[in-house]
Amino acid sequence: MTKDPVPLKAIHHIEFWVGNAKQAAHFYRTAFGFNQIAYSGLETGDREKASYVLEQGKVRLILSTPLSGDNGISSHIKKHGDGVKDIAFHVNDAAACYKACIERGAKSAAEPTELNDENGSVTHAAICTYGDTLHSFISHNDYSGPFLPGFVESNVKGDSVGLRFVDHIVGNVELGKMNHWADFYAKIMGFTQLQHFSDEDISTEYSALMSKVMESDNGRIKFPINEPAEGKKKSQIDEYLEFYGGPGVQHIALLTDDIINAITKLKAKGVEFLEVPDTYYENLTQRVGAIDEDVEVLKKLKVLVDRDDEGYLLQLFTKPVEDRPTLFYEVIQRKGSKGFGIGNFKALFEAIERHQAERGNL
């Protein structure tokens, strides 16, 4: 067995660059039930940006906003709107992971640097991936602070909905670039291809996409890469690329052990989800086999079900969480299935297309 060139332990955090981090943090606390655990900004000596760290289960998000109109965060937001800037990995040796990626052809975003405060030190480095997105490598050298050096504790509780960890993160790239980025993760980071969906798998009468799912060596990190495919009308990927101003993170899938409880709470908090017609639930158990959940409850919540050789999954997708039709979330519960809900793709696409038509973007 070949040695993993870039051994990743897990996703350390996902950093968003947003126009107003204070308000975004409030949204994630009240709508998604995240706890706010750390903060950095003017009060901690950062003159460039303010950042709020949110946590639920093993999911950690940083929301960062610029403190002036002439830095890199400001121009990023002007082009993309609020969006994911950095998918950061927890590793044993950030410098070694960075070096391995650069030697294999990755473009540097930040050379290895040791960050220190009174709680110890952390090593950070970063490389570029699709669009303006980065991958940071973070190794903790017995660090005991609330998050990373420069952050202070901020204890604001949210009402958890039971989200446990990041299941997968989906990137949208331009037509003809899916294979390029799948190869990037394979050759530079040692990922393997888990699944490949063609435009025949993911299509409706009007639009289509293609996708390859890349997985880290330890199986903990999964990155589907989508590109648009030719269709009669504009696909959801084309719409994303147009409004985001290029490639970027399309959606983040968050795993839960109880999707009925999670969706019930999220809807009560005002989170908006895509809805499939009631006809989806006719003959559901004939399509997917016996399930533990009450079909009428799933129908009421509009939760989708799909089965593969290893079990089944339940999933539901939010509407875009910002005014630009870009980033959204998936809530997923796995009961053995390691798939991505291929049996639901058509129903989902049609639901997305209904909203695209309302926005005048189909």
Image: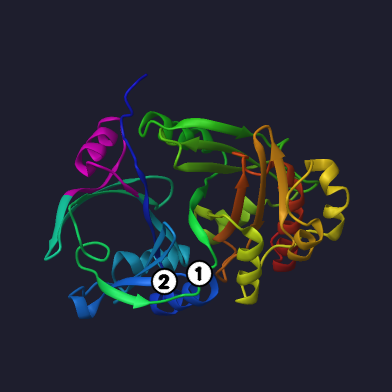
Does 155 sit left or right of 349 as displayed?
left
Number of numbered discs visible in the structure rendering: 2
Amino acid under label 1? Ser
Q: Residues within 10 Å of mark 2 (few under 14, many from 20)?
A: many
Judging depth in this view, the residue of 51 and 134 nearest the camera is: 51
Name the image quarter holding the C terminus. Answer: bottom right
**Residue 99 horizontal/vertical position (percent):** 22, 36
Q: Which residue is mark 1?
A: 160
Q: In this view of the protein, can residue 3 be seen by the observer?
A: yes
Mark 1 and mark 2 in contact (Cβ < 8 Å)?
Answer: yes
Secondary structure type for disc 2: strand
Q: Earlier in the sequence, mark 2 or mark 1?
A: 2
Q: Quick check: is 128 in the magenta stretch?
A: no
**Residue 47 horizontal/vertical position (percent):** 21, 75
Judging depth in this view, the residue of 226 and 229 nearest the camera is: 226
Q: Quadrant of residue 288?
A: top right
Judging depth in this view, the residue of 90 and 294 nearest the camera is: 294
For the point 25% across and 31% down, which residue is it? 103
Does 197 sit left or right of 28 as displayed?
right
For the point 21% across and 73% down, which residue is it? 46
Q: Which residues are magenta?
A: 89-112
Mark carried by residue 35:
2
